[in-house]
């Protein structure tokens, strides 16, 4: 076990950051490190070596605040980690799921239907749509409690069917649209089974990370955001969010995106 056998303090408030070594995930983690509303952060990543770059001690107490967990994002790994966190049931107030993929060394977003490749399509759907939902499947009982738990999942404006004017990017668009639909399903179900959980699909805008790097030359001036700015906007929205329905699809400026 990574956690102690000591009883959890009733005032303990934990956050979970999934994909914590990516550009946005790391920025969210660093911001939570200095947020006094959160006393413990569980950072989940394929490669926790980034720990060397982050001081994981609380500025207030000097105690360890960040606990790093390694996951290969298989369902067994997700289930095992969720089980390990069971003692924090009812104490998790923030969950940020930051996984995402757009391109790789051997593939790029499709410009034409002829560019669609079934292997790449499945890979992109797995990362962008399936992994976040599998996390919510296994975390549900952990998040259930009397206090509000706010969940943010990185989506994208291009996942909006109503806002699609350009076409292309078949796999990425479709995977984010599928993610949004499944999050809507989750929110409807959680309204019965985990009424304290609020879910936001968050469009961060074009962020200066490896995901957007090949496409940044076409970004209008002032619209390429730093990860730190996006993390600030995301957490501000979550902490101030007042639910007006079972699910919200919002951009970095807190504006609703059409499905």
Image (cartoon, rainbow, N blue to C red):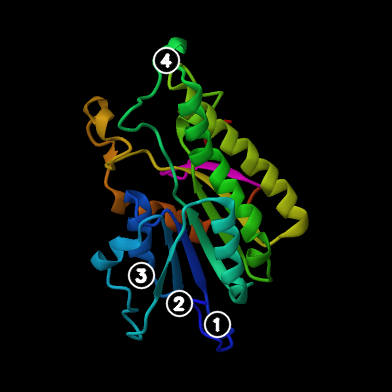
Of badges 1 and 4, the one in the foreground is 4
Residue pointed to by mark 4: 115
Residues under numbered marks 1 and 2 in contact, where contact means CB atoms less than 8 Å apart: yes
Could you say which is closer to the camera, residue 85 or residue 176?
A: 85
**Crowdedness of circle 2 by 10 Å Cα count: few (<14), some, many (20+)?**
many
**Crowdedness of circle 4 by 10 Å Cα count: few (<14), some, many (20+)?**
some
Mark found first going from the N terminus, 3 or 4: 3
Could you say which is closer to the camera, residue 69 or residue 232?
A: 69
Q: Which label was assigned to residue 90?
A: none
Which SS class for mark 3? helix
Quarter residue 25 falls in: bottom left
Residue 114 location (% of width, % of height): 44, 10
Q: Relative to residue 72, is residue 69 depicted above or below?
A: below
The dominant secondary structure in magenta is loop
Could you say which is closer to the camera, residue 171 or residue 173?
A: 171
Q: Which label was assigned to residue 11?
A: 1
Left or right for 122, reference 53 = right
Q: Which label was assigned to residue 33?
A: 3
Quarter residue 249 falls in: top right
Residue pointed to by mark 2: 39
In magenta segment, residue 250 = yes
Residue 241 location (% of width, % of height): 54, 55
Q: CA distance from mark 3 to mark 4?
A: 42 Å
Residues under numbered marks 3 and 2 in contact, where contact means CB atoms less than 8 Å apart: no
Left or right for 109, reference 248 = left
Left or right for 257, reference 109 = right
Q: Relative to residue 161, is residue 208 depicted above or below?
A: below
Mark found first going from the N terminus, 1 or 4: 1
Range covered by the magenta-colored residues: 246-255
């Amino acid at each position: 076990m990574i956690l102690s056998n000591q009883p959890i303090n009733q005032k303990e408030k934990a956050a979970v950051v999934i994909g914590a070594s990516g550009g946005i995930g790391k920025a969210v983690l660093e911001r939570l490190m200095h947020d006094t509303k959160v006393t413990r952060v569980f950072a989940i990543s394929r490669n926790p070596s980034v720990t060397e770059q982050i001081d994981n001690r609380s500025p207030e107490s000097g105690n360890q605040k960040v606990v790093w967990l390694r996951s290969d994002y298989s369902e067994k790994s997700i289930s095992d980690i969720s089980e390990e966190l069971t003692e924090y049931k009812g104490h998790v107030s923030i969950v940020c799921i930051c996984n995402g993929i757009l391109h790789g060394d051997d593939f790029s977003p499709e410009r034409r239907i002829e560019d669609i490749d079934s292997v790449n399509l499945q890979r992109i759907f797995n990362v962008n749509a399936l992994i976040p939902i599998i996390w919510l499947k296994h975390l549900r009982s952990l998040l259930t409690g009397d206090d509000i738990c706010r969940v943010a999942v990185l989506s994208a404006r291009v996942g909006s069917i109503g806002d699609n004017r350009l076409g292309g990017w078949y796999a990425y668009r479709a995977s984010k649209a599928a993610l949004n639909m499944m999050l809507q399903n989750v929110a409807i179900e959680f309204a019965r089974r985990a009424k304290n959980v609020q879910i936001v699909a968050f469009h961060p805008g074009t962020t200066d990370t490896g995901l957007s790097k090949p496409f940044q030359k076409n970004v209008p001036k002032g619209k390429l955001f730093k990860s730190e700015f996006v993390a600030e906007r995301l957490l501000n929205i979550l902490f101030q969010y007042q639910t007006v329905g079972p699910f919200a699809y919002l951009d970095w400026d807190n504006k609703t995106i059409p499905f």
